[in-house]
């Protein structure tokens, strides 16, 4: 997915924030191994997961510039998810 995210960040000028309940060491390895271009928020207490009612991993959320939630994506369906996310980015 990372090649798509990098391309989308250039095309659509957005920021990626990854929320993870993993330990910092695990997340650092994952980010390094997968060349993730984004910020990582460690949610060890689960407060972000509770606020956005995250029950499925992965979940993705799109916010507009002022912080209003625009779209949420739950689960991963391969190329279908990629097409759905890009279509939403094109309309933001």
Image (cartoon, rainbow, N blue to C red):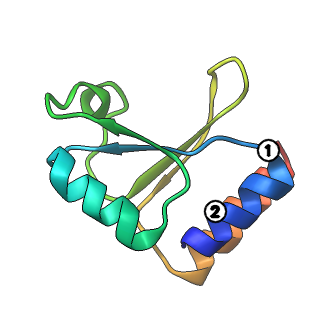
Could you tell me which quadrant the C terminus lies in?
top right
Q: Residue at the spot x=41%, y=53% of the render?
A: 59
The quarter of the displayed image where residue 47 is located: top left
Position of residue 73 measured from the top left corner of the image (x, y, whole percent): 51, 54
Position of residue 69 measured from the top left corner of the image (x, y, whole percent): 59, 29
Determine crowd level at label 2: few under 14, some 14-19, many 20+ residues with C-alpha closer than 10 A: some
Give the number of the disc on residue 84: none
Q: Nearer the viewer, residue 85 or 22?
A: 22
Determine crowd level at label 1: few under 14, some 14-19, many 20+ residues with C-alpha closer than 10 A: few
Give the number of the disc on residue 13: 1
Whether residue 8 sits left or right of residue 90 in the image: it is left
Residue at far top of view: 66
Q: Residue at the spot x=29%, y=54% of the render?
A: 28
Give the number of the disc on residue 5: 2
Position of residue 68 measured from the top left corner of the image (x, y, whole percent): 63, 22
Q: Residue at the spot x=79%, y=44% of the render?
A: 13
Could you tell which of marks 1 and 2 lies nearer the N-terminus? 2
Q: In the structure shown, which secondary structural element does the residue marked by tag 1 occupy?
A: loop
Residue 88 visible in the picture: no
Task: Tell me whether circle 1 and circle 2 mark residues in contact (CB < 8 Å).
Answer: no
Whether residue 75 sits left or right of residue 71 in the image: it is left
Whether residue 76 sits left or right of residue 49 in the image: it is right
């Amino acid at each position: 997915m990372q090649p798509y995210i990098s391309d989308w960040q250039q095309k659509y000028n957005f920021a990626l924030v990854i929320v993870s309940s993993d330990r910092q060491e695990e997340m650092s390895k994952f980010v390094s191994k997968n060349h993730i271009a984004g910020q990582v928020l460690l949610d060890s207490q689960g407060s972000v997961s509770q606020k956005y009612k995250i029950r499925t991993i992965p979940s993705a959320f799109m916010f507009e510039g002022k912080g209003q939630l625009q779209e949420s994506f739950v689960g991963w369906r391969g190329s279908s998810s990629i097409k759905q996310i890009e279509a939403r980015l094109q309309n933001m």
